[in-house]
Amino acid sequence: MKIQEAKAYFEKLCVENHVKLIVPIRENARLRTTLGRVKFSYDAFNGVYFPTVVEFSAAHLKDSDTEVIDTITHEFVHYYLLMIDPTERHGHDAMFRALSKELGCIPRATKKIEPKDDRQEKYSIYCSKCGKLVSTRTRACKITKFPELYRSKCCDAELKVVQNY
């Protein structure tokens, strides 16, 4: 799907749900694991949040149309909630989940991304208790340098870092 088609679908959702589109919709080639996002700012004087831009991953726009439409709808729900209730940051709360289901998109925050062939995973991070692969990293970071500061989600156990090079 091209960004123009994504914009048109987002605009259609705005019209159908009676909300004005006041921000640009852009393609962002730097987004790798984030499929889309609504960036916003906070006006401390008035105590309100307001959207500044809606962005979609250039790589994700090449995926199947159904996946892209689901992401566009997901980001629209964020945008819509910011527009109708600017005093709250809804994130993925109950209101977000209810509206997502009503509009027919999956109210989840993440999608499993297959690693790209050109990226060599240098570190594999495992749960020390059950041995499950918890994460991979392409470069050194806090979790690879100081694994003792972190715990696995599965067993709440220490992490074991393995270098793959």
Image (spheres, rainbow, N blue to C red):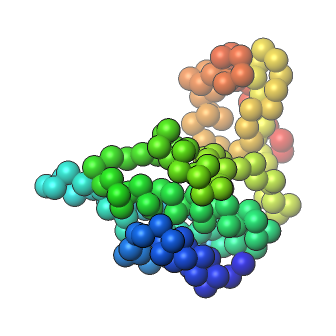
Identity of the residue drawn at 63% across and 22% down: 151
Residue 133's place in the image compared with 33, above or below, is above
* Residue 103, image quadrant: bottom right
Judge whether residue 3 can be spotted in this image. no
Quarter of the figure that contains the N terminus: bottom right
As drawn, which residue projects farthest toward the left? 45
Q: Where does the image place residue 55, in percent across and percent down from the top left?
A: 53, 69
Q: Nearer the viewer, residue 29 or 107?
A: 107
Q: Residue at x 16, y 55 (%)?
A: 46
Residue 5 in picture, x, y percent from top left: 64, 82
Question: Residue 13 vs residue 40: left or right?
Answer: right
Q: Is residue 119 above or below residue 5?
A: above
In this view, the residue in front, 118 or 22, is: 22
Q: Which residue occupies the foreground of this view, 105 or 117?
A: 105
The count of marks equals 0
| Residue at the extreme bottom of the image, as rendered | 4
Q: Quadrant of the C terminus?
A: top right
Nearer-the-camera pick, 163 or 37 = 37
Q: Position of residue 58 (x, y in %)?
A: 66, 73
The correct choice, above or below, for 130 with respect to 107 in the image is above
Q: Residue at x 82, y 17 (%)?
A: 130
x, y (%) of residue 41? 32, 59
Whether residue 88 is visible: yes
